[in-house]
């Protein structure tokens, strides 16, 4: 940990959002190809990446570091943006659990099962995009404006500890490979590829 020069916590989180937006662009591309008759097995790869990235990499920095710091600084935890965003995390998790069930064992064969699978994944895509935008335009901006500099520096130090612990881990490299492959395999036209290594470039 570099206490003298901690990472900017909002840069770290926005970098991870950029990766998520890139993967969601690829998910939409995959959904469109499956809707036109392509093999639905690739849908499972997106579910596995999103579950792993959110639960093991992104949400710990929000739930355990940023949200907790805001609540302890007087932001209401049971109403307003923190409560809404916390509920979003749970709803996204529920949709991912459904999507995982639908895409298990080779994925939906067709018919109603495929239709419901694509509907769940489109709902997941829409909710996650809304959630990321709301965090950036409401929560992060408010936190950056309202929290004292010392508190923001503490957040950066806590995120740096998380990143230092994760650096070199199998989990980190596995998630990076998954994101790279998904975006390489389903790269929508005129979208640039976003690498996990670039998510937290200030610290990784
Ligand atoms: Fe979030
Ligand atoms: Fe987020």
Image (tube, grey):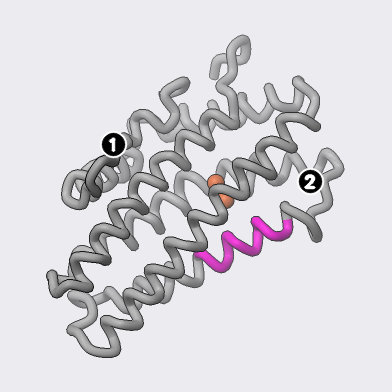
Q: Position of residue 134 (x, y in %)?
A: 62, 49
Q: Which mark is residue 71?
A: 2
**Does the magenta segment cover residue 114?**
no
Report whether 156 appears left or right of 16. right
Report whether 140 appears left or right of 99. right
Label located before the other in sequence (1 or 2): 2
Q: Position of residue 101 (x, y in %)?
A: 34, 77
Q: Which residue is mark 1?
A: 192
Magenta region: which residues? 83-92
Against 201, residue 69 (above or below) is below
Q: Are circles 1 and 2 on residues that touch, CB within 8 Å?
A: no
Residue at 54% of width from left, 56% of height from top?
130
Residue at 57% of width from left, 60% of height from top?
89
Residue at 18% of width from left, 75% of height from top?
106
Dot 2: what SS? Answer: helix
CA distance for labels 1 and 2: 36 Å
């Amino acid at each position: 940990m570099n206490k003298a020069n901690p990472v900017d916590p909002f840069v770290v989180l926005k970098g991870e959002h950029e990766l998520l937006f890139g993967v969601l662009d690829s998910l939409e591309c995959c959904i469109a190809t499956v809707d036109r008759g392509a093999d639905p097995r690739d849908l499972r790869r997106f579910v596995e990446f999103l579950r792993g990235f959110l639960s093991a990499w992104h949400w710990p920095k929000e739930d355990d570091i940023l949200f907790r710091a805001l609540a302890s600084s007087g932001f209401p935890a049971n109403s307003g943006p923190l409560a809404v965003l916390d509920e979003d995390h749970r709803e996204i998790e529920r949709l991912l659990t459904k999507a995982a069930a639908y895409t298990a064992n080779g994925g939906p064969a067709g018919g109603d099962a495929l239709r419901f699978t694509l509907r769940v994944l489109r709902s997941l895509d829409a909710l996650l995009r809304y959630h990321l935008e709301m965090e950036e335009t409401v929560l992060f901006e408010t936190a950056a404006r309202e929290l004292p500099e010392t508190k923001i520096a503490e957040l950066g130090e806590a995120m740096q500890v998380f990143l230092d612990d994760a650096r070199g881990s199998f989990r980190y490299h596995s998630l990076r490979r998954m994101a790279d492959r998904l975006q390489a395999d389903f790269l929508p036209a005129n979208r640039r590829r976003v690498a996990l290594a670039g998510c937290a470039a200030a610290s990784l």
